Amino acid sequence: MREQQRKHEQAADRSGETEVLVIAPTELGDQKEAVLSHTDSLEDGNGPPGNGSIYYDYDAYNVKEDYQALMEAHGKALLKHKELRLRIEGNCDERGSREYNLALGQRRADSVKRALTLLGVPVSQIETVSFGSEQPKVTGHDEEAYAENRRSDLTYSASRKMRQ
């Protein structure tokens, strides 16, 4: 699955397109929360990057150099769009105790947050949470499934009053 994602990103790079997110309002009481989802590329390429995931080695929480460009893209988007909020969700594979996996998931999310703040992103734009092994991306009990579940998911939202 990661290989397919890399091929898609490489194809987008070759074509000069950048996947971005668009804000679509969803009703929430008297406020509306903007929910961001994948869309076609924008011609100017200045929008925020798409939601994504950062993957880790077994029992690790450091963000690999492979993700530097992705981190910089998210950092630039958050600096440019102050209304955006990024939620970083730390996840683990099923190995390890519940408590250990919750702590590891939090370290993974915090590691991404730390990398973004080093790029100048205000802490107020970032929220972290750990799901441990409670929300697997892939079911299975082999290394391929474990590798897909060792991740931090990055999702955007933007809360603001919207006029009708």
Image (cartoon, rainbow, N blue to C red):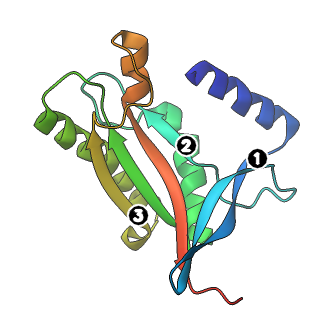
Image quadrant for the N terminus? top right
Across the whole image, how many numbered discs are drawn on residues? 3
How packed mark 3 is, by other alpha carbons closer than 10 Å (few <14, some 14-19, many 20 or more), is many
Please tell me which residue is depicted at 80% across the width and 49% down the height of the picture. 40
Could you tell whether 155 is left or right of 13 in the image?
Answer: left
Please tell me which residue is depicted at 40% across the width and 61% down the height of the picture. 117
Mark 3 or mark 2, earlier in chain? 2
What is the three-letter code of the residue carrying label 3?
Ile
Please give the label number shown on residue 136: none
Q: Pointer 3: what residue? A: 126
Is residue 139 or residue 89 the one in the foreground? 139
Furthest residue toward top? 142
What is the three-letter code of the residue carrying label 1?
Thr
Mark 3 or mark 1, earlier in chain? 1
Q: Position of residue 146 (x, y in %)?
A: 36, 19
Q: Position of residue 150 (x, y in %)?
A: 36, 29
Disc 2 versus disc 1: distance between alpha carbons? 13 Å
Q: Pointer 1: what residue? A: 18
For the residues carrying marks 2 and 1, which lies nearer the camera in this image?
Answer: 2
Is residue 134 or residue 109 the one in the foreground? 134
SS of the residue at dot 2?
strand
How packed mark 1 is, by other alpha carbons closer than 10 Å (few <14, some 14-19, many 20 or more), is many
Determine the image quadrant of residue 124.
Answer: bottom left
Is residue 143 or residue 61 the one in the foreground? 143
What is the three-letter code of the residue carrying label 2?
Gly
